[in-house]
Amino acid sequence: MASASSPKPPRAAGEIFGEHLPLAVRYAELLVTTGIEHGLLGPREASKVWERHIVNCAAVESLLPHRSRLIDIGSGAGLPGLALAIARPDLKVTLVEPMARRTRWLEDALSELGLTQVSVQRARAEEMSALIQAPVVTARAVARLDKLATLAWPLLPEGGRLLALKGDSAETEMHEASAILERIGTSSSTVHEVGADILATPVRVIELVKGSRPRVMRSGSGRGEKT
């Protein structure tokens, strides 16, 4: 049962988390108490913690195959990475976050929740490029799509996917980033709407798939060419 400081989980939370709902409730309690105290969540967000944050992030689990590995960059309060790990304990999740106070909070939250399949790395995404890779990279409210894709690409193998939670700006950002996405070697780009059957507002997620060959500029060519 949720504490007095944590709102009651909506029906959609039960649909997404199933038997893991009690763990999600405990996560919500941490977000609206120590999460607010540490500045990871604004005080006015407490009443909307389920609909705006936890459920919206966890709904993305429908795009993830069984026993997948993912890197969540700019994790902050663990959104979406920690919410996905609770909904899907088969996932192996690495939370990448550069701010010390946030990583300390994440480590305490993992200990409290007993999520042994999740690890925390205090670093910027670009600092991890030579150290880790995973088939999926997730991100929410980190950067515009052109910069986000550039950050995520070294963390993905060929065929790996970036899942970026973008909301109403999804198509606009894809259009504005199209030249850069082509140059870095994006084999496909798609906007998914997830949770339409259980959420009042479906979650819009951009999926970018890393191709095999980025475009490079040859010296003096004046145009991009495939290599």
Image: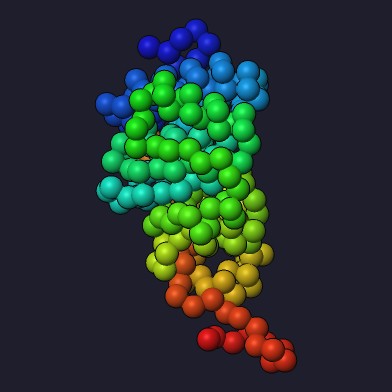
> What residue lies at 42% left-to-right and 68% top-to-bottom?
158
> Is residue 207 or residue 34 the one in the foreground?
34
> Is residue 29 or residue 104 the one in the foreground?
104
Is 175 placed above or below 225 here? Answer: above
Is 57 placed above or below 134 here? Answer: above
Q: Position of residue 185 (x, y in %)?
A: 52, 73
Whether residue 209 is visible, yes or no, is yes
Residue 220 falls left or right of residue 165: right
> What residue lies at 57% left-to-right and 36% top-to-bottom?
76
Instruction: Please give the count of numbered marks on the rendered protein.
Output: 0
Q: Position of residue 98 (x, y in %)?
A: 61, 41
> What residue lies at 39% left-to-right and 57% top-to-bottom?
135
Residue 100 falls left or right of residue 204: right
Q: Quadrant of residue 92?
A: top left
Residue most toward the top? Answer: 4
Q: Position of residue 172 (x, y in %)?
A: 64, 59
